[in-house]
Image (cartoon, rainbow, N blue to C red):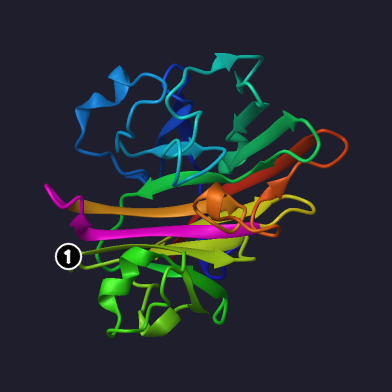
């Protein structure tokens, strides 16, 4: 419970045929999910280039890398029971059950694969936020900046050929990341390590995202695009992304940076999203 605030019941909607994408997360007269400008999402076929339609995309087994945003966002899922969807791939099967009873959204996941199978997963949630919004996470959290941030740092700061540069939240390498606007023409990605719970603060509204998964690395990814991407038609989009793993690209993930399926052959995790409004 957020001190001095009233719970706001949330409701969720999703699109089974188009990657299981979350299309709405609303409550208290507010829609939290941003909708993108690209109309081509419904025409996507497996292995197509990513279409930034907004909402919340399921990214698995990688976020960046190949295929971009993973394998499951571009494929239809199937219903497997009340509130439950399943998608089967060559090396894994993923099921997801979303409920919003009591106004708190709970998404339960189960991935079945051979023991030793490695993956990264992210709930790629693009949020509709005002320029006054900010991201609250524990001060001092180790935070990996990605190479697009190099241009915002003094010359020579970025280590040669490094996939990331690590500093402390909220200002790794001197870049203040917890403010989510106004638009300044920049776009950068970061991963907050060992950070399973964050809160988005926007005026009187609070959105809390919390990830539970025993024995696996949990992070929060941030995509802060303040009108800096893409170069041929930039727009504003802010992603706050609960993540299993600690790297955007599975190919860059070291032994401790990805989920490893244990001998039992499955990994289960839970994402909980709640909202509050200050009195």
Q: Is residue 53 above or below residue 19?
A: below
111 to the left or right of 177: right
- In the displayed structure, 173 sits above or below 119; it is below
Q: Which residue matches tag 1?
A: 185
Q: Position of residue 125 (x, y in %)?
A: 43, 46
Q: Position of residue 250 (x, y in %)?
A: 56, 48
Q: Is residue 159 visible?
A: yes
- What percent of the width, then of the height, locates residue 11? 48, 36
Q: Principal SS element in the magenta part?
A: strand
Query: Image quarter for residue 50?
Result: top left
The residue sitting at 27% across, 84% down in the picture is: 155
Q: Position of residue 135 (x, y in %)?
A: 43, 67
Task: Residue 231: say if magenta.
Answer: yes
Query: For residue 220, which quarter of the picture?
Result: bottom right
Q: Is residue 123 covered in magenta?
A: no
Residue found at x 53% / y 43%: 62
Work out whether residue 149 or residue 185 is closer to the camera in this orientation and state it.
Answer: 149
Q: Secondary structure at mark 1?
A: loop
- Left or right for 260, reference 51: right
Asked if residue 171 shows in the view, the reply is no
Q: Nearer the viewer, residue 93 or 169?
A: 93
Residue 156 located left or right of residue 69? left
At 55% from the left edge and 49% from the top edge, which residue is drawn?
Answer: 251
Q: Report the span colored magenta.
A: 218-234
Q: Nearer the viewer, residue 2 or 117?
A: 117
Q: Residue at x 61, y 62 (%)?
A: 1
How dense is the environment of label 1, judged by Cα within 10 Å: few (below 14), some, or many (20 and up)?
A: some
Q: Nearer the viewer, residue 134 or 112?
A: 112
């Amino acid at each position: 419970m957020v001190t001095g605030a009233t719970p706001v019941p949330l409701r969720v909607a999703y699109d089974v045929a188009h990657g299981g994408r979350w299309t709405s997360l609303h409550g208290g007269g507010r829609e939290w999910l941003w909708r993108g400008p690209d109309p081509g999402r419904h025409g996507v076929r497996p292995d197509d280039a990513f279409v930034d339609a907004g909402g919340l995309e399921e990214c698995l087994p990688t976020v960046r890398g190949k295929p971009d945003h993973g394998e499951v966002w571009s494929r239809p899922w199937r219903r497997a029971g009340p509130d439950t969807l399943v998608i089967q791939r060559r090396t894994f099967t993923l099921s997801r059950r979303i409920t919003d009873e009591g106004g708190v959204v709970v998404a339960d996941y189960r991935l079945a694969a051979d023991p030793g199978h490695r993956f990264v997963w992210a709930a790629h949630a693009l949020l509709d936020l005002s320029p006054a919004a900010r991201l609250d996470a524990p001060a001092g959290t180790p935070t990996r900046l990605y190479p697009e941030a190099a241009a915002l740092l003094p010359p020579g700061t970025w280590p040669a050929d490094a996939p990331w540069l690590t500093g402390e939240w909220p200002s790794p390498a001197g870049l203040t990341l917890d403010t989510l606007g106004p638009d300044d023409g920049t776009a950068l990605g970061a991963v907050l390590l060992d950070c399973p719970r964050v809160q988005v603060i926007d005026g009187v509204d609070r959105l809390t995202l919390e990830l539970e998964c025993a024995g696996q690395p949990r992070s929060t990814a941030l995509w802060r695009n303040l009108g800096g991407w893409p170069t041929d038609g930039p727009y504003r989009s802010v992603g706050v992304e609960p993540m299993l793993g600690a790297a955007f690209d599975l190919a860059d993930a070291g032994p401790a940076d990805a989920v490893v399926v244990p001998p039992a052959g499955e990994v289960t995790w839970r994402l909980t999203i709640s909202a509050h409004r200050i009195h």
